Amino acid sequence: MNQKLSIVMITKDSEKYLEQSLSSCKFADEIIIVDSGSKDKTKKIAEKFGVKFFYYEWQGFAKQKQLAVNLAKNDWIFILDSDEIITDKLREEVLSILENPFKKGYLVPRLNYFFGKPIKRCGLYPDYSLRLFDKNYGKLSNSIVHERVLINGPVGKLKNYLIHYAYESIEEFINKQNRYSTLGAKPNKIKAIFSPAWTFFKLYFLKLGILEGWRGFLISTLYSQYTFWKHIKTQETKER
């Protein structure tokens, strides 16, 4: 039986890639956006695509995404971020799966772009996350950051990736990781001393970031800095 699909997304001032992202969603039977107070052109862009647009105050990544899932009329959900693009091959694979799903959820690989280039090393590819699932068997975790879908049932893997425009500038990278390290702080002074060096070594040498040129060095350095921040900060929750 061919299953209908709802693509769900959360936004706030997300105009930058939103038109590209929504253009890649046209095959879905429904697109749901839960917005937390955009002041840019997010809503105007969404209206061009016939999106069902809702406003809710910011409650955290997991809760906000779960709201979007709950608003969807179809059982099968694809969670997409506003800076992500569903490729043609991934679209065809998703449609094929929905003709007769054998699993309750599917992990989707993601190709991340850093500073204008796709990065396949530094441990950043295939970067699987569970995006396609039957909402009767799945829900979002309660994590403050790095939320994920928890599935009560068998999980498969898709072959084709979605594109993620992660960071265009160093400033953007630093600002986001600074915020995430505050929200997900795990105070531990011992780890704050030793974990950053291990993170750099792992990403740059073991995960072959060295082959990505200056981008690999920068990514490894900034993620090691994020590790330091995460373990040196006291835990607190701030609004997005």
Image (spheres, rainbow, N blue to C red):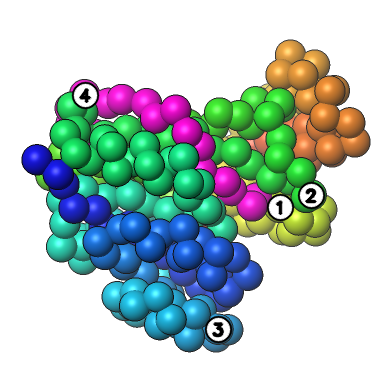
Q: Is residue 126 visible?
A: yes
Q: Amino acid at mark 1?
A: Tyr
Q: Compare marks 2 and 4 and give the one earlier in the sequence.
A: 2
User: Of residues 99 and 214, which is closer to you in this image?
Assistant: 99
Q: Amino acid at mark 4?
A: Pro
Q: Amino acid at mark 2?
A: Phe
Which region of the structure is painted magenta?
A: 151-166
Q: Does 15 appear above or below 105? A: below
Q: Which residue is mark 2?
A: 115
Q: CA distance from mark 4 to mark 3?
A: 40 Å
Name the residue at 64% across, 37% down: 231
User: Which numbered marker is on residue 154?
Assistant: 4
Residue 77 place in picture, x, y as percent: 26, 50
Q: Which residue is mark 3?
A: 41
Q: Which residue is mark 1?
A: 167
Counting other residues with Cα less than 10 Å from the Cα at mark 1, is it few (<14), some (14-19), or many (20 or more)? some
Q: Are marks 1 and 2 in contact (CB under 8 Å)?
A: yes
